[in-house]
Amino acid sequence: MRVGLYPGSFDPITVGHIDIIERAFTIVDHLVIAIGKNATKTPLFELDKRLAMIEEEVGPKAAARDVRLEVISFDTLLVDVARQYKAGLIIRGLRSASDFEYETQMTAMNRTMAPEIETIFLPASPEVGFVSSTLVRQIVGMGGVVDPFVPASVLKKINELK
Ligand code: ADP
């Protein structure tokens, strides 16, 4: 049983995250999506909303692939979360050189603290590699259209904010 941990802020979950998650399904038997509690100071969606949105969107996809899914939130060290859920793999997406710099530094420090946990990077798919939650939040804040960047169920929740 291979357990993977995919951490992020997911505020909101985008088509870029979904792409990474669907590809993670080919690697793990059990995926834990972990929402970091302090990642954004003024969130678009509160944590419990984000959690429900991920469950709604990703739950059926995981079931269809026979992958066990857990969506959780955390405010502790990532390596402690990985240990708690017996995840041997931390999964991260790589979009750009700046992602790479940040991610490799974080990975090196996590590896020092928990050598038994491996981090793997999945390169962003070209079609969605430009999408970021931060930009989605900014566009929403300015009344723009985010249809191409988020799943339909999330778009519905965004429209309900207005
Ligand atoms: P963001 O950086 O967009 O605010 P998160 O902090 O929730 O999103 O990111 C969680 C993980 O998902 C990170 O590893 C990040 O690199 C990855 N990710 C986010 N958006 C994409 C995307 N469009 N394509 C590939 N990976 C992505």
Image: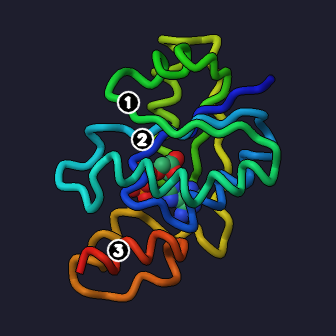
The answer to whether residue 157 is visible is yes
Lateral position of residue 131 relative to residue 120, left or right = left
Q: Which mark is residue 158?
A: 3
Q: Report the front residue among 27 and 124.
A: 27
Q: What's the amino acid at mark 1?
A: Phe
Q: Earlier in the sequence, mark 2 or mark 3?
A: 2
Is the residue 16 above or below the residue 122 in the image? below
- Give the CA separation, mark 2 to mark 3: 19 Å
Q: Nearer the viewer, residue 44 or 118?
A: 44
Q: Secondary structure at mark 1?
A: strand
Mark 1, other Cα within 10 Å: few <14 / some 14–19 / many ≥20: some
Q: Mark 2 or mark 1, which is nearer the start of the sequence?
A: 2
Q: CA distance from mark 1 to mark 2?
A: 6 Å
The reply to whether the residue tagged 2 has its Cβ within 8 angstroms of ligand 1 is: no
Front disc: 2 or 3? 3
Q: Residue 158, position in %: x, y? A: 35, 74
Label 2 crowd bin: few (<14), some (14–19), many (20+), radius 10 Å:
many
Q: In the image, which disc is placed on residue 90?
A: none
User: Element under label 2?
Assistant: strand
Which circle marks residue 74 in the picture? Answer: 1
Most foreground residue, 57 or 2: 57
Q: Which residue does the image show at 38% across and 30% down from the upper left?
A: 74
Tell me if residue 96 can be seen. Answer: no
Left or right, 17 with reference to 45:
right
Residue type (three-letter) at the residue carrying disc 2: Ile
The label number, if any, that marks residue 35 in the structure image: 2
Q: Amino acid at mark 3?
A: Ile
